[in-house]
Amino acid sequence: MSAPAEPYNQIPDRTRCPTCGASRRGEALCHRCKSDLTLLIRLEHCVDQLRLRARRCYARGWYRRAAAVADRVVSLESRPEDLQLLACARLMWGDFVGAADGYCQTRRQTSRIHGGIHDFRLQSSIPSGCDSH
Ligand SMILES: [Zn+2]
């Protein structure tokens, strides 16, 4: 039995055109396929701003707000450090089940990045999809 698909499975490559895979040169149009990347660039900028906001909230001790913003970041573009921030923020404001779930997601994503898939959740007692929201 395989794990259900999650939005945390892939890390987008910001250096490549999502249409043809050509390297991006920071322009709104892909130099190879002429895809308009304006909306993608705008979305990436929004994600960067959200990521910064989540980190600032965490640094100020606003853990619940940090978790909410980090959750939004992860839904748009999930990187290991985003999942780690989400898990830590959830832990700090007392969402222990959510923190454990975030930790498991971090482990899975990190395992994927480093090659072998290791589904930590299957070995733990944390039920799948157990969110405290
Ligand atoms: Zn292209």
Image (spheres, grey):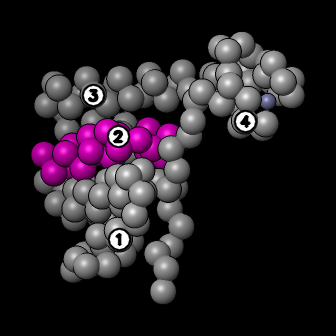
Bounds of the magenta span?
Answer: 73-93
Amino acid found under the numbered disc labelled 1: Asp
* Label 4 packing within 10 angstroms: few (<14), some (14-19), many (20+): few
N-terminal label among 1 and 2: 2
* Label 2 packing within 10 angstroms: few (<14), some (14-19), many (20+): many
Front label number (1 vs 4): 4
Residue to which mark 2 is pinned: 82
Amino acid found under the numbered disc labelled 4: Gly
Quadrant for the C terminus in the image: bottom left
* Residue at x 19% of width, y 45% of height: 88
* Label 3 packing within 10 angstroms: few (<14), some (14-19), many (20+): many
Task: Quote the CA–CA distance across marks 1 and 3.
Answer: 27 Å
Task: Quote the CA–CA distance across marks 1 and 4.
Answer: 29 Å
Where is residue 16? Give x, y as percent: 65, 30
Task: Point out which mark residue 78 bears.
Answer: none
Residue to which mark 3 is pinned: 55
Task: Point out which mark residue 119 bears.
Answer: 1
N-terminal label among 4 and 3: 4
Mark 2 residue's CB less than 8 Å from ligand 1: no
* Label 1 packing within 10 angstroms: few (<14), some (14-19), many (20+): some
